Image (tube, coloured by chain):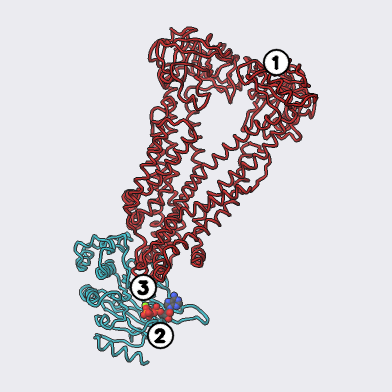
């Protein structure tokens, strides 16, 4: 995060997304909550970042702000070389369609579309012609076989999440955001999803930001950022389950 | 449980408001029909009293017996009679304004009467000038004089039903009817009695009014008259007359009210589908909550009661609002009818106890009925669903409802079939069976339609998916994802549109038949018809014959009389009039020049004064054929034998029998013509003949002369008008169906909040979301319209087949209009989808995602 010390910092091509002095305040007066307190964070291209922190620390808020789903109270978010605060509602939507991928904890798929259709949904919503080789590659990676033509309610929870990750990758976005993508899965199924994500980072230099409570899941990342009370309190590179647990212990003593 | 009901009602205001709207409109229409008929009945009741007041007794003909000067003299001689006064009345006299235009009945009638010189027997009073005293004099009611610009002292021309067609008379005075000249918009005129007899072309008095001298009780006088005149004469006292007049008014009012009511019933029937559908959707959305209630110990009965309680509240509130809407509608309808020139009497708008009870009963009843099945289903919710969760958005079609649907459809179809083809003769039974059969059929089809709703939605949605790519595909799939919901929503629309489509099919067939009939049977270039109720005067025919541009002129006359064959005429039991056969005549020597009648057997040349040609289906009905003899009733009620020497085919311009002009004169009592056909003279051009015909038409404003083509166009136009009015009335039911679409869409969107949020998150724009929702609505409504068109065509075909061939013969289906109807429904669906689409677009993405 030293890279971001100066607010005049100009992004290089090696940064997929960053937030500068990101502040989000909910409500006003007595009920005012500062969910994000001047957060500076950047996500280098091709890096798998995990965000951890206690419940209510602002992880989801940060993710939503980064992903253009929510607007900051002050500060800015830049995806690629686009400053989100300057975008209209419509442009923000188009940006989400092309530059950002999503994986939620549950309910990631449109029930009326088949797995294959769900994967290509962001591309189909636009007029840009799809990169078919890439889509084929992603679809092969999902390894769903004939289930590709099935509707989501005919897939297991793990298969559904795999389709969701594939969907997030389909448009070759600048960043993929995943909010507890394995939260609803058993550890073995979860591990498969995390493997899949890790491969996307390693093989295709995809940038992924993932929120998780699970130290095992976080250990798949290249870096872990710790959040508490809307501030970044710690950071860990090449984490293992043990170092994460230690960091969590120490940050909770703050 | 009442507490839960209360909270649910409060929590679902918009949904309940939409549900209630259907009830409000239905109850409003029913109530306005009742309010209107109550008010009009009161008002016309006092009018009836005003008309008959002063007449102590009245004598009229109850059979074909004379009622003239001799009978008047006999009555005047009866002890206790002060004065007897014979009178005439007609609607065939029309005054012509100073500028040459004719005062025509425009809703309310134009009535001419003879002037009664006895003050007691005359309900009118001279206002200005004096009473008519002899030939060439007339009077008019004061408001009409003012409205139409007639001035006392001036001489005017009037159209009269004599051979000349016109008379000239001086307006010698104006009068008022009753105290305030409350004529309800009618134009009233009067002539001196003998002059009226001549001008109105009458042989008998319309009736003889009697004032008693008070020396004997009225019943005794009445008994004397009855004894003297016998059963062929009808003797009535004031009470009888009042009852008769009131009954005439009331039957008119009740026909009017029943027309309103039947459309309200269709609308309420449609409402049942919508309300049931709404409750069903909401119950499946609340399945977790209901499961939880069951898990914590609520019995099925308690859950059911909570739901029925909700329905009760909705029904109650909506019915009360509906009553007031009905009141408002009654005012609006009065204003509307008055704007059309009806000049209804000012009438009270009483909310009678009966109106309130009927309105509330119907409104609450319909709501409870609609909620019954959803409530039962809610009660049967298993407690497990609270925990397991359950996708409310897609429900499989139950086998039981399919079987039930097939059963209802079969019973409904059977009932309709028996009604159409079973030869049922009582009209109420027939209508009841048709209505009941159709209702069962509609419910049955609705239960069955989930089977086809998904494929139809996908087929209709395919082009949309092509055009709009993913939003289009989603619109199509969303319409298909819950076939039951789509089917029920569409069914509401199906009902209204199937009735419209049926009318289209019948109307088109009627138009084509008439066109074909005219095209193949009429050789004449022009036809002259009376405008309104009158006749074509002999003078008009004379003028046509005198015109060098016109060739052959043939006048036609019809008269209904009794013909006895081997079997009674079908339909004769229902109504006396239907036992009559229409007997036509024209100059048989000229028939080939103007008409092309398709003869099955025989020849016109054989028709003498004692023989006739007969229409094929009438001959069949009477059980007679070529060479057989029938008995024909003459004007003096005696019968003569006539032999059938020719049979003409069905689908001809004459519907009964054809006789010589000489024979006809002993059957009918009419010198003017029903219509006249004429040709262009040899050596004249069409343009010259057009001009000649136009001149005659302007000289005789009582007729309308048209070329064959103009006439065909006019008939088509009239059928179109009828269809238009019918569609207008069904618009209420169709409108309610669209409310149903808005309602279902809004509920579906609520149900799909998460999904919509996800779509927005992955990059669907608001615009795309609007399109998706609106096209889904369009697909659902097109499914309804398509089902409606199909059902309507089937109904239409059945009606055409069931109706005798001389009324409806060659089935023709207006494919283009029907396709237009389906397309229009699709567009209306797009519009109906507007509000739900906006709601979907406004969805907060974060909240939608968070609503896990
Ligand atoms: N829409 C909102 N209105 C008001 N306060 C909010 C809203 N969303 C989040 N907050 C508050 O902001 C803070 C951060 O919330 P956030 O959802 O980002 O936490 P989180 O770290 O994702 O927690 P968890 O691990 O439980 O998902 C919390 O105190 C929360 O109560
Ligand atoms: Mg969170």
Q: Secondary structure at mark 2?
A: loop
Residue B81 on image: x %, y %: 77, 21
Residue contact at pointers 2 and 1, CB within 8 angstroms:
no
Residue that appears at 21% across and 64% down: A136
Q: Secondary structure at mark 1?
A: helix
> Mark 2 sits on what residue?
A229
Nearer the observer: mark 2 or 1; the answer is: 1
Chain A painted colour: cyan
**Is B734 above or below relative to B585?**
below
- Specify the quarter for ligand 1: bottom left
Residue contact at pointers 3 and 1, CB within 8 angstroms:
no
Residue that appears at 76% across and 34% down: B179
Residue contact at pointers 2 and 3, CB within 8 angstroms:
no
Between the residue at mark 2 and the residue at mark 3, the CA separation in whole angstroms equals 20 Å
> Mark 1 sits on what residue?
B71
**Quarter-of-image position of residue A234:** bottom left
Report the chain shown in red.
Answer: B
Q: Is residue B323 left or right of residue A93?
A: right
Q: Residues within 10 Å of mark 1 (few under 14, many from 20)?
A: some
Residue A18 on image: x %, y %: 35, 78
Q: In this view of the protein, which residue sits in the foreground, B783 or B29?
A: B29
Query: Who comes first in sequence, dot 2 or dot 3?
Result: 3
| Mark number displayed over residue A67 | 3
| Mark number displayed over residue B596 | none
* Quarter of the C terminus of chain B within the rendering: bottom left
**Is B811 above or below relative to A222?**
above
């Amino acid at each position: 995060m030293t890279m971001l010390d100066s607010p005049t910092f100009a992004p290089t091509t090696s940064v997929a997304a960053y937030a500068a002095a990101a502040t989000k305040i909910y409500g006003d007066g007595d009920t005012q909550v500062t969910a994000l307190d001047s957060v500076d964070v950047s996500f280098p291209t091709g890096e798998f970042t995990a965000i951890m922190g206690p419940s209510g620390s602002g992880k989801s808020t940060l993710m939503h702000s980064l992903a253009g789903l929510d607007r900051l109270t002050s500060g800015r978010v830049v995806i690629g070389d686009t400053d989100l605060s300057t975008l209209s509602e419509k442009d923000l939507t188009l940006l989400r369609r092309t530059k950002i991928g999503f994986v939620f904890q549950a309910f990631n798929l449109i029930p009326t579309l088949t797995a294959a259709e769900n994967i290509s949904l962001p591309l189909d919503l636009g007029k840009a012609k799809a990169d078919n080789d890439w889509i084929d590659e992603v679809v092969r990676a999902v390894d769903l076989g004939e289930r590709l033509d099935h509707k989501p309610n005919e897939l297991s929870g793990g298969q559904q999440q795999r389709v969701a990750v594939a969907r997030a990758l389909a448009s070759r976005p600048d960043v993929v955001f995943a909010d507890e993508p394995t939260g609803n899965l058993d550890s073995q199924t979860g591990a498969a999803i995390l493997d899949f994500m890790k491969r996307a980072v390693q093989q295709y230099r995809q940038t992924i930001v993932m929120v998780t409570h699970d130290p095992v899941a976080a250990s798949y990342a290249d870096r872990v950022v710790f959040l508490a009370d809307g501030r970044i309190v710690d950071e860990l590179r090449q984490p293992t389950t043990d170092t994460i647990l230690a960091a969590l212990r120490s940050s909770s003593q703050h | 449980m009442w507490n839960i009901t209360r909270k649910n009602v409060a929590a679902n205001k918009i949904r309940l408001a939409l549900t209630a709207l259907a009830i409000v409109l239905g109850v409003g229409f029913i109530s306005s029909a009742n309010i209107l008929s109550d008010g009009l009945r009161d008002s016309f009741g006092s009018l009836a009293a005003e008309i008959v007041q002063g007449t102590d007794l009245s004598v009229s003909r109850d059979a074909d017996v004379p009622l003239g000067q001799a009978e008047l003299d006999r009555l005047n001689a009866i002890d206790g009679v002060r004065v007897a006064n014979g009178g005439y009345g007609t609607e065939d006299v029309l005054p012509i304004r100073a500028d040459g235009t004719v005062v025509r009945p425009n809703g309310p009638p134009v009535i001419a009467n003879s002037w009664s010189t006895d003050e007691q027997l005359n309900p009118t009073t001279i206002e200005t000038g004096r009473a008519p005293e002899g030939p060439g004099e007339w009077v008019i009611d004061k408001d009409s004089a003012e409205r139409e610009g007639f001035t006392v002292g001036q001489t005017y021309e009037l159209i009269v039903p004599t051979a000349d067609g016109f008379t000239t008379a001086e307006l010698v005075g104006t009068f008022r009817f009753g105290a305030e000249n409350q004529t309800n918009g009618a134009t009233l005129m009067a002539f001196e009695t003998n002059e009226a007899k001549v001008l109105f072309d009458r042989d008998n008095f319309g009736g003889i009014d009697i004032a008693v001298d008070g020396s004997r009780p009225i019943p005794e006088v009445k008994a004397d008259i009855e004894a003297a005149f016998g059963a062929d004469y009808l003797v009535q006292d004031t009470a009888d007359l009042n009852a008769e007049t009131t009954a005439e008014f009331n039957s008119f009012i009740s026909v009017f009210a029943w027309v309103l009511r039947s459309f309200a019933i269709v609308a309420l029937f449609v409402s049942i589908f919508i309300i049931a559908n709404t409750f069903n959707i909401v119950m499946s959305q609340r399945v977790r909550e209901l499961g939880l209630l069951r898990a914590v110990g609520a019995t099925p009965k308690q859950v059911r009661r909570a739901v029925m309680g909700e329905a009760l509240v909705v029904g109650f509130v909506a019915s009360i609002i509906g009553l007031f809407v009905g009141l408002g509608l009654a005012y609006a309808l009065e204003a509307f009818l008055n704007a059309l020139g009806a000049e209804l009497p000012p009438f009270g708008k009483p909310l009678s106890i009966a109106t309130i009870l009927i309105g509330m009963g119907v409104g609450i009843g319909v709501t409870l009925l609609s909620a019954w099945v959803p409530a039962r289903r809610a009660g049967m919710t298993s407690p497990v669903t609270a925990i397991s969760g359950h996708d409310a958005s897609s429900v499989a079609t139950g086998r039981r409802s399919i079987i039930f649907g097939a059963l209802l459809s079969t019973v409904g179809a059977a009932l309709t079939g028996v009604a159409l083809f079973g030869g049922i003769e009582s009209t109420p039974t027939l209508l009841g069976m048709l209505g009941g059969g159709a209702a069962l059929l509609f419910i049955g089809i609705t239960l069955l339609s989930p089977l086809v709703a998904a494929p139809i939605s996908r087929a209709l949605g395919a082009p949309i998916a092509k055009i709009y790519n993913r939003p289009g595909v989603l619109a199509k799939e969303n319409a298909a994802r819950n076939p039951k919901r789509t089917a029920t929503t569409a069914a509401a629309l199906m009902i209204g549109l199937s009735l419209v489509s049926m009318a289209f099919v019948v109307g088109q067939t009627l138009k084509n038949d008439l066109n074909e009939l005219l095209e193949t049977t009429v050789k004449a270039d022009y036809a002259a018809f009376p405008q309104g109720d009158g006749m074509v005067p002999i003078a008009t025919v004379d003028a046509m014959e005198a015109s060098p541009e016109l060739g052959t002129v043939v006048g036609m006359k019809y008269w209904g009389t009794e013909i006895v064959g081997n079997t009674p005429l079908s339909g004769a039991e229902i109504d006396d009039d239907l036992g009559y056969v229409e007997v036509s005549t024209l100059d048989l020597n000229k028939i080939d020049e103007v008409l092309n009648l398709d003869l099955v057997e025989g020849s016109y040349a054989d028709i003498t004064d004692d023989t006739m040609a007969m229409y094929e289906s009438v001959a069949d009905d009477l059980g007679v054929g070529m060479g057989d003899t029938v008995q024909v009733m003459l004007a003096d009620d005696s019968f003569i034998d006539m032999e059938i020497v020719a049979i003409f085919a069905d689908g001809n311009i004459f519907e009964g029998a054809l006789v010589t002009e000489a024979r006809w004169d002993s059957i009918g009592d009419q010198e003017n013509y029903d219509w006249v056909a004429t040709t262009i003279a040899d050596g004249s051009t069409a343009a010259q003949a057009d001009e000649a015909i136009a001149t005659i038409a302007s000289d005789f404003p009582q007729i309308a002369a048209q070329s064959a083509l103009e006439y065909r166009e006019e008939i088509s136009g009239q059928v179109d008008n009828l269809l238009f009015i019918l569609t207008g009335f069904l618009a209420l039911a169709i409108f309610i169906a669209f409310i149903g679409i808005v309602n279902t869409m809004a509920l579906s969107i609520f149900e799909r909040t998460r999904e919509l949020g996800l779509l927005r998150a992955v990059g669907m724009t608001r615009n795309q979301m609007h399109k998706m929702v609106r096209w889904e609505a369009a697909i659902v409504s097109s499914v309804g319209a398509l089902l409606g068109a199909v059902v309507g065509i089937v109904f239409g075909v059945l009606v055409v087949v069931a109706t005798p061939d001389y009324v409806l013969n060659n089935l023709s289906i207006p494919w283009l209009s029907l396709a237009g109807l389906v397309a229009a429904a699709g567009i209306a669906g797009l519009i109906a989808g507007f509000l739900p689409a906006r709601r979907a677009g406004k969805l907060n993405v974060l909240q939608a995602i968070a609503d896990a």
